[in-house]
């Protein structure tokens, strides 16, 4: 079975704080891909990152960083020095097996207050 | 670069009416996916097509049907609309020749059923 769990429903931080969004996944596939998407209030899904199951190297992109740990089936997302524009719903997703569909987590709503 | 185009972006219908959403995938992409995102929920997979054939089916109601045409664009037809069909409908596309698992999402079509 494929499943993505984002236990944090909503997080509120003050601007410039660091925040980590958790993502735990379940899959029996040995080859799979993990993603993070941002969904601002306007509704579109903005691609942030893709990580394949064979690459556990952490990645940093500006204020964003991702920590992929296969041992704990987690793919956590950290925003450093958060900004108001980071306010959005963030979805973690898994694409495995026949790669025909994504499995989304329930999303974490991030509120960054000035 | 060209992205996934969805039309219309917004649609208002009455109960029991019919609606059609269109999706134009990224050029060269041969696979199209439809997702439904209800208010405050994560996107749910409805159906996918590869080379004009249905490749996978998710939680798509019997009142809905979809197809992919020879130019690879896809249409989602929804009949006997219900209030619960009000949602953001995403189309995504991918190219089967790339084992990358990434889906490119359109900006979504927001359907409101009154």
Image: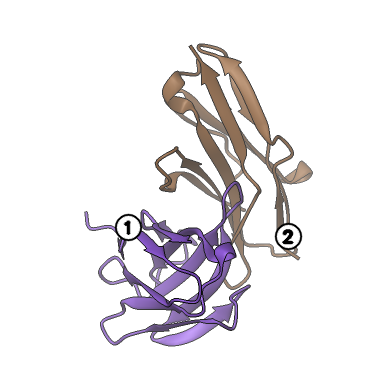
Give the residue at mark 1: B9
Q: Nearer the viewer, residue A53 or B39?
A: B39
Residue drawn at 44 percent across, 38 percent down: A41
Q: Residues within 10 Å of mark 1 (few under 14, many from 20)?
A: some
- The spot of residue A79 in percent (x, y) is 53, 24
Q: Secondary structure at mark 2?
A: loop
Across the whole image, how many numbered discs are drawn on residues? 2
Residue drawn at 47 percent across, 66 percent down: B99
Q: Nearer the viewer, residue B10 or B31?
A: B10
- The spot of residue B3 in percent (x, y) is 28, 57
Res A7 → quadrant: top right
Left or right placement of residue B48 versus residue B62 in this view: left
Question: Can you tell which chain is drawn purple?
Answer: B
Rounded to the nearest whole Å, what is the CA distance between mark 1 and mark 2? 34 Å
Observer able to see residue A101: no
Q: Nearer the viewer, residue B29 or A106?
A: A106
Q: Residues within 10 Å of mark 2 (few under 14, many from 20)?
A: some
Give the residue at mark 2: A27
């Amino acid at each position: 079975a494929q499943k993505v769990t984002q236990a944090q429903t909503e997080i509120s931080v003050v601007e410039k704080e660091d925040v980590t969004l958790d993502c735990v996944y379940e899959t029996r596939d040995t080859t799979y891909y993990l993603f993070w998407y941002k969904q601002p209030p306007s509704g579109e899904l903005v691609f942030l990152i893709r990580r394949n199951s064979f690459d556990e190297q952490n990645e940093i992109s500006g204020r964003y960083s991702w920590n992929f740990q296969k041992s704990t089936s987690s793919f956590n997302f950290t925003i450093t020095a958060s900004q108001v524009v980071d306010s959005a719903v963030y979805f973690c997703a898994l694409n495995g097996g026949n790669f025909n569909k994504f499995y989304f987590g329930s999303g974490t709503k991030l509120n960054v207050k000035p | 670069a060209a992205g996934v185009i969805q039309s219309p972006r917004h649609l208002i219908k009455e109960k029991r009416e019919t609606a059609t959403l269109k999706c134009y995938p990224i050029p060269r992409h041969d696979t199209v996916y439809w997702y439904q995102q209800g208010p405050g929920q994560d996107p749910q997979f409805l159906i996918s097509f590869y080379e004009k054939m249905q490749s996978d089916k998710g939680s798509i109601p019997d009142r809905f049907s979809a197809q992919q045409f020879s130019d690879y664009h896809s249409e989602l037809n929804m009949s006997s609309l219900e209030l619960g069909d009000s949602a953001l409908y995403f189309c995504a596309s991918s190219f089967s020749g790339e084992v990358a698992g990434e889906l490119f999402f359109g900006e979504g079509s927001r359907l409101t059923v009154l």
